[in-house]
Image: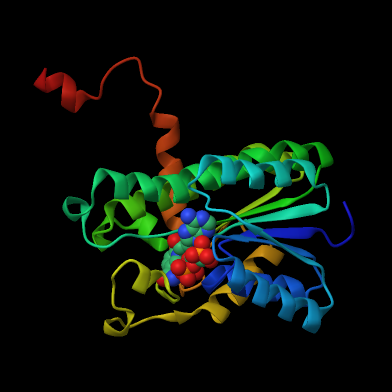
């Protein structure tokens, strides 16, 4: 791997992914941009080549289509210049669970869970063998809060958080850095794409600010970065409460409250 590894970013045609591309280009990293809209990626690539003098490849792929996803997996597996994967491509869907069809919810899982996990799986063995590399997974605060009313989208993002924490435990000791970034409402096209009105909301962050904060977390090697959360101690307390339960899970018998009722 070179001193400045190339960065493969999914969902790089717009929104948070496009800002990641700009920021990594400014830092002097070559890029591989992945999304469906080739024209938008080519326009971004041309600008970044011109402004930052980096090499930018465009890899058009619909990550919900098996053979297109396989091409991205192969690139991650085989291209030893790539040392950072930003697993950013993601989508939401209009309405609640009762409004969404089985195909709609399966589509969300296919992009937000299956593609993200397959891409991490494709690259992790190479990173672990090299003893370096980074995987950035874009989750969401929605994955912490069923109260937002986005059951399937939130469940996919809870998966992203759990996967990141699990990979951090397994790959961290092998020199691979894994980060989950949990944005809250951020001004991008995802809202319009999923039939929601961002203008009716308060507390909306610009994508530039979100990514700049996420990159501070990246540079600090945080496992979980929640850019909008004012008090980091709240996340630490939440995570500590979870860990307190762990020694209590292995029991020969059901808890007293269930034995009494049986
Ligand atoms: P966005 O503006 O809608 O961008 C989504 C990106 O993913 C686009 O580049 C899109 O490009 C790509 N994409 C969508 N479907 C794809 C597919 N089937 N195959 C390949 N690429 C696909 O959304 P964003 O807000 O930047 O979202 C980026 C990430 O942040 C997502 O994981 C999202 O869940 C997460 N997030 C966003 C917010 C927010 O409020 N914006 C909050 C929390 C988390 P093409 O259309 O060209 O394929």
Of all residues, the one furthest to the front in this rendering is 39
Given residues 138 and 100, the one toward you in this image is 100
Q: Is residue 236 visible?
A: no
Given residues 183 and 246, the one toward you in this image is 183
Q: Is residue 50 above or below residue 126?
A: below
Name the residue located 41 percent from the left edge and 59 percent from the top edge: 91
Q: Is residue 11 above or below residue 21?
A: above
Q: Position of residue 85 (x, y in %)?
A: 67, 54
Q: Is residue 151 above or below residue 118?
A: below
Q: Position of residue 75 (x, y in %)?
A: 72, 46
Residue 9 falls left or right of residue 127: left
Name the residue located 61 percent from the left edge and 75 percent from the top edge: 19
Q: Position of residue 77 (x, y in %)?
A: 73, 41
Res 196 quadrant in image? bottom left
Picture colour scheme: rainbow
Q: Is residue 6 visible?
A: yes
């Amino acid at each position: 791997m070179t001193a400045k590894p190339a960065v493969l970013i999914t969902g790089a045609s717009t929104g948070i992914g496009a800002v990641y591309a700009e920021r990594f280009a400014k830092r002097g990293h070559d890029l591989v941009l992945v999304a469906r809209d080739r024209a938008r990626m080519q326009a971004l690539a041309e600008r970044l080549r011109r402004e930052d003098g980096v090499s930018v490849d465009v890899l058009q792929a619909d990550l919900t289509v098996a053979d297109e996803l396989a091409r991205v997996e192969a690139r991650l597996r085989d291209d030893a210049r790539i040392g950072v994967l930003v697993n950013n491509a993601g989508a939401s869907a209009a309405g609640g669970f009762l409004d969404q069809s089985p195909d709609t919810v399966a589509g969300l899982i296919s992009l937000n869970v299956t593609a993200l996990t397959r891409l991490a799986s494709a690259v992790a063995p190479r990173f672990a063998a090299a003893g370096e590399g980074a995987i950035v997974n874009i989750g969401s605060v929605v994955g912490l809060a069923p109260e937002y009313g986005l059951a399937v989208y939130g469940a996919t993002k809870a998966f992203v958080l759990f996967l990141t924490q699990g990979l951090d435990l397994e790959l961290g000791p092998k020199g691979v850095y894994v980060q989950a970034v949990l944005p809250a409402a951020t001004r991008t096209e995802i809202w319009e794409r999923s039939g929601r009105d961002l203008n009716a909301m308060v507390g909306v962050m610009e994508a530039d600010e979100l990514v700049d904060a996420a990159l501070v977390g990246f540079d600090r090697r945080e496992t979980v970065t929640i850019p909008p959360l004012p008090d980091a101690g709240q996340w630490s307390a939440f995570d500590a409460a979870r860990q307190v339960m762990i020694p209590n899970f292995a029991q020969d018998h059901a808890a007293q409250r269930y034995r009494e009722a049986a």
